[in-house]
Amino acid sequence: MKFKFSIRREIKVMVVLIGLSILIAFSGRKNDGILCKSIVIELENVHENHFVDEDEIYRVVESGDQKLVGMRLDEIDLREIETRVLADRQIASAEIFTDLKGNLVVHVELRRPIARIVLSDAPDAYIAQDGSIMPVSDKYTSRVLLLSGAWLKEIVKHDRLDETGDGEKIFEMIEFIRANAFWRAQIAQLDFKNNGKIEIFPQVTGQRVEFGAPVDIEEKFQKLMIFYKEILPQMGWTTYERVNLEYEGQIIAE
């Protein structure tokens, strides 16, 4: 009985596979000869970052050697269009496909910036949520954490933050700040010194915060919270000009 059951099961699987292959072949043939009637741009931008709009994506799609509208759908090189669209660093992903109505559909998702690199002698850049380095836009500015300092000039030469020496730790520090409502509101800027150490410029209090290298991140922010909650209320908000968090188990304020 078990032997007969396994045979039936194999036959069912074969029938399903044959049916699926027939359906795929049929769908492919239905696209044969259909002309491209229009290009439909679907822009996924849940974070409302207006670096790129539908018109710009449309121009990129149509920038090839042949005019797509009027071509047979089965003759359009979807992979080549995808490569051109993804060349824009502000685009995270692109899905290109055709439908039986004669549409060439371009579904695009934009990257979300989480920090902006500000340089005095080089072009600015954004760090995206996936760690990518992307250029700024003339048409839109995202209000995010600022990063400054000549040390960052090396970072903007790369495509991703994790391709650089301390990139992963810097990304971890940015994400730590973003994940906490207090730090997100309090910290305006991170300044990177030539030795790789970081200084924090707060929004409200006037103290310069010497954070040191991007290590022991959570512990250092815990010490800074103690400084804000326990030391400043007692000693006065303008008493100290700087606070140093570099040394383990210590808060040095002057």
Image (cartoon, grey):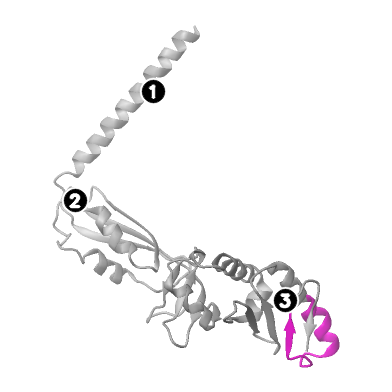
Distance, label 1 to label 3, CA atoms, is: 64 Å
Residue at 41% across, 78% down: 136
Nearest the eye: 134 or 27: 134
Q: Secondary structure at mark 2?
A: helix
Residue 54 x/y as whole percent = 32, 68
Q: Which residue is mark 3?
A: 246
- The magenta segment is 226-246
Residue 217 x/y as whole percent = 68, 69
Rendered image: mark on residue 13:
1
Distance, label 1 to label 2, CA atoms, is: 32 Å
Of mark 1 and mark 2, the one earlier in the sequence is 1
Q: Which residue is mark 2?
A: 73
Residue 46 x/y as whole percent = 46, 65
Q: Is residue 102 above or below residue 19?
A: below
Q: Nearer the viewer, mark 3 or mark 2?
A: 3
Q: Secondary structure at mark 1?
A: helix
Residue at 74% across, 84% down: 243
Residue at 49% across, 71% down: 127
Q: Label 1 sits on what residue type?
A: Val
Image quadrant in which you'd find residue 67 = bottom left
Q: Label 2 sits on what residue type?
A: Leu
Rendered image: mark on residue 78:
none
Q: Is residue 215 above or below residue 71?
A: below
Does 114 lie within the magenta span?
no
Q: Is residue 13 left or right of residue 180?
A: left
Q: Is residue 6 left or right of residue 85?
A: right
Of mark 3 and mark 2, the one earlier in the sequence is 2
Image quadrant in which you'd find residue 82 = bottom left
- The crowding category of the residue bearing disc 3, from other C-alpha atoms within 10 Å (few below 14, some 14 to 19, many at least 20), is many
Extreme-right residue of the structure: 234
Q: Label 3 sits on what residue type?
A: Glu
